[in-house]
């Protein structure tokens, strides 16, 4: 079904939408960001000096070039990669991690025990942790999110899911719970250039929606999280809907809880945060709560029904959902109990990415709330970075204690993007003053020192401080040299051109703001498209005094669309950017990789979801069409890979030597081709119908060189 690849790069010069005015206003500032006014002028802007001068220097050195031909769009049951590359399926769902799981075969009936000892389902964010040395590129631990489940594939041999008399069988629910969460698995390079996992590695581990986890930070031990399971509010069970990820300088993995509200149900009186986050009021997504009763252990299913009882909070699970919605820190090198780092906010976290790491300065982590008209946040640690806190890979170190030093105390901010290309980080602290001059604690109806309450009501707090509602913030990545922060805004069907007012008020009584948010939001400079179907990528640089300067880097679009602002062609058209990674390659240069999670539009008719690459340092000054990448330089943006039918492409990292790149294929429709095999050629098309399995895909050059160049 693929159309011919044509060159549409000189088309759609129209500026006939209201937002053309806004992009013209951005032009002069973008020239500054690109070095067009020279390093001296750049330095005068404050905070731009380092990146501006490095960029000018990098361009003098001749920019890094993408060394592959853009691949055509594809709509097959196979991965497509450029000529000269190999792509291998690695650790698909169901891969046994140890001897407690039997060998995978396509007719395998999954059980709680089997799933708890096998790779989880629906691979998403991931990161690699070296075992030999920081730069070792042949042996590492892969920490992998298993975001959600495909019940048809999970229950294919038996038929299911089942719900006799409206009740889910306990072992079905346990199996589904064990298919969620995180997988830690040792990976090694083979002599033929391919990759294999290490069965029975002592590091192999699953953390599921049933695994005990500690709470830490402001919410831990507060009244908000006391439950029948943890009367002192310091513990919970499981992490759920782990979407994207992050990592720390001290060698731990951050996994982020995104669409967790749907596994709970509240049929009674709602908390305002339940309403704000969209917890169901009729049944949970999979009906796990229906398995409660005889045969369950320690309320393992009852906890998903958070309907308040008539007694104390410690007699039921009204607070159980308040133990979810966090960034969770895991030490991949040990079996230590994971920690929910509540200081980083509570919402539908997509991921959590570190900013530049500099000795003697606080650490910064960027995190977004992936829902329509929600916010971008950052956390700044109270502790300043001490390089002595970076252990040797694999060494015996209590990494989670280091994590407590940097991730439990600090300030959470939400971003306000102003029309003039500047922005401000708004502190979400009890004493912060809202635009109407009240303290945030008072505006939320909280006690004056209730830091835990601010976190529980993070979204309401950001509303009240005047944060900018965004087009579904997904992944972020930071150029560690320039400090530029890239963020994908995937799409937004609830953005309107005509200025719908927010449905809450900033100056009313305390609780008027709670539990509401924006149903729709008017376009703004940072989110300029009404009914944004294709998404965009924004970037910014930090400035002093909690300010930043931002610009739109790239707009997604169908090549033929009227609003093709970045001048895309068939060879790089895309929509719904999601995964993102700035791959630093030295000399202040790097490749920005990004992945798509698209459906139901003209781009989807042309190609399955994809992985694209662009070299930001190679981009000349744009043509004023409103993004850094535009009709004059968009040939710097190339399609590197296309996934199989039905999938989303997500998760990305490369070996330190850049000779292998890893991505994930989530929810494929009919892939990988060999239903019985674990490792296999990812580019092969199945002969008939297979039991689909999400999997990691390792991609490397046949000549052993660096990927992408
Ligand atoms: Fe799980 Fe926002 O993607
Ligand atoms: Ca995502
Ligand atoms: Ca997505």
Image (tube, grey):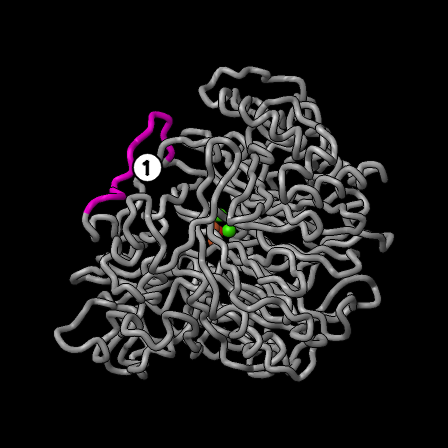
Callout 1 environment at 10 Å: few (<14), some (14 to 19), or many (20+)?
A: many
- The residue at which mark 1 appears reads as 520
Task: Look at 47% across and 31% down and name the residue there.
Answer: 419
186 lies left or right of 563: right
Q: Is residue 233 above or below residue 127?
A: below
Which quarter of the image is occupied by the C terminus? top right
Task: Look at 33% across and 28% down and name the residue there.
Answer: 499
> In this view of the protein, can residue 620 be seen by the observer?
yes
Task: Look at 22% across and 62% down and name the residue there.
Answer: 266
* Image coords of residue 457 (percent x, y): 32, 58
Of residues 247 and 641, the one nearer the viewer is 247
Q: Does the magenta run of residues contain 243?
A: no
Task: Look at 37% across and 26% down and name the residue there.
Answer: 497
* Image coords of residue 180 (percent x, y): 46, 67
Q: Does the magenta run of residues contain 496?
A: yes
Q: Is residue 559 above or below residue 540?
A: above
Q: Which stretch is magenta?
A: 495-508
Which quarter of the image is occupied by the N terminus? top right
């Amino acid at each position: 079904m693929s159309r011919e690849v044509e060159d549409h790069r000189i088309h759609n010069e129209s500026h006939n939408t209201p937002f053309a005015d806004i992009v013209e206003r951005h032009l002069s500032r973008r020239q500054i960001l690109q070095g067009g006014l020279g390093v001296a002028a750049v330095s005068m802007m404050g905070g731009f000096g380092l990146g501006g001068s490095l960029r000018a220097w990098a361009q003098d050195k001749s920019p890094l070039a993408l060394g592959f031909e853009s691949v055509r769009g594809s709509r097959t049951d196979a991965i497509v990669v450029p000529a000269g590359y190999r792509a291998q399926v690695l650790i698909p769902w169901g891969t046994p991690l140890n001897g407690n799981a039997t060998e995978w075969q396509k007719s395998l009936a999954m059980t709680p025990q089997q799933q708890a000892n096998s790779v989880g389902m629906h691979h998403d964010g991931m990161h690699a942790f070296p075992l030999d040395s920081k730069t070792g590129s042949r042996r590492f631990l892969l920490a992998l999110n298993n975001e959600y489940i495909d019940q048809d594939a999970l229950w294919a041999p038996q038929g299911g899911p089942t719900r006799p008399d409206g009740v889910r069988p306990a072992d079905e629910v346990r199996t589904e719970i064990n298919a969620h969460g995180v997988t830690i698995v040792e990976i090694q390079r083979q002599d033929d250039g391919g990759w294999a996992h290490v069965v029975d590695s002592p590091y192999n581990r699953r953390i599921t929606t049933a695994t005990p986890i500690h709470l830490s930070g402001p919410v831990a031990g507060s009244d908000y999280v006391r439950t029948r399971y943890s009367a002192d509010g310091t513990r919970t069970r499981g992490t759920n809907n782990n979407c994207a990820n992050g990592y720390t300088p001290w060698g731990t993995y951050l996994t982020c809880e995104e669409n967790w509200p749907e596994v709970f149900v509240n049929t009674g009186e709602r908390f305002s945060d339940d309403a704000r986050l969209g917890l169901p009021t009729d049944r949970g997504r999979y009906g796990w709560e229906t398995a409660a009763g005889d045969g369950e252990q320690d309320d393992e299913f009852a906890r998903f029904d958070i309907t308040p009882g008539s007694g104390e909070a410690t007699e039921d699970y009204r607070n159980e959902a308040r133990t979810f919605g966090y960034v969770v820190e895991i030490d991949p090198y040990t079996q230590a109990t994971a920690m929910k780092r509540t200081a980083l906010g509570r919402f539908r976290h997509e991921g959590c990415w570190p900013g530049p790491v500099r000795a003697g300065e606080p650490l910064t982590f960027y995190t977004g709330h992936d829902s329509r008209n929600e916010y971008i946040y950052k956390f700044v640690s109270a502790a300043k970075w001490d390089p002595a806190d970076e252990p040797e890979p694999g060494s015996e170190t209590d990494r989670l204690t280091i994590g407590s030093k940097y991730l439990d105390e600090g300030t959470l901010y939400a971003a306000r993007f102003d029309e003039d290309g500047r922005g401000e980080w708004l502190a979400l602290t009890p004493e912060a003053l809202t635009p109407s001059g009240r303290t945030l604690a008072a505006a939320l109806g909280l006690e004056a020192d209730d830091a835990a309450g601010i976190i529980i009501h993070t979204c309401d707090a950001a509303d009240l401080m005047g944060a900018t509602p965004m087009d579904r913030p997904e992944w972020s990545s930071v150029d560690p040299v320039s400090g530029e922060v890239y963020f994908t805004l995937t799409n937004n069907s609830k953005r309107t051109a005509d200025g719908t007012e927010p449905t809450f008020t900033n100056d009313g009584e305390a609780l008027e703001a709670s539990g509401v948010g924006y149903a729709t939001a008017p376009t703004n400079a940072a989110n300029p498209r009404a009914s944004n179907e294709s998404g965009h990528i924004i970037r910014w640089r930090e400035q002093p005094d909690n300010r930043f300067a931002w610009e739109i880097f790239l707009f997604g679009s169908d090549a033929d669309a009227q609003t093709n602002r970045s001048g895309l062609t068939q060879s790089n058209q895309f929509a719904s950017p999601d995964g993102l990674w700035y791959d630093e390659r030295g000399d202040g240069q790097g490749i920005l990789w990004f992945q798509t999670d698209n459906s139901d539009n003209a781009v989807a008719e042309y190609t399955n979801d994809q992985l694209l690459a662009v070299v930001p340092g190679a981009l000349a000054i744009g043509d004023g069409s409103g993004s850094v990448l535009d009709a004059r330089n968009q040939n710097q943006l190339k399609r590197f890979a296309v996934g199989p039918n039905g999938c989303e492409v997500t998760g990305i990292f490369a070996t330190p030597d850049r000779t292998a790149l890893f991505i994930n294929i989530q929810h494929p429709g009919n892939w990988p081709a060999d239903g019985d095999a674990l490792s296999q050629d990812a580019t092969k098309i199945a002969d008939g119908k297979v039991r689909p399995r999400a999997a990691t895909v390792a991609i490397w050059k046949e000549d052993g060189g660096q990927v992408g160049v």
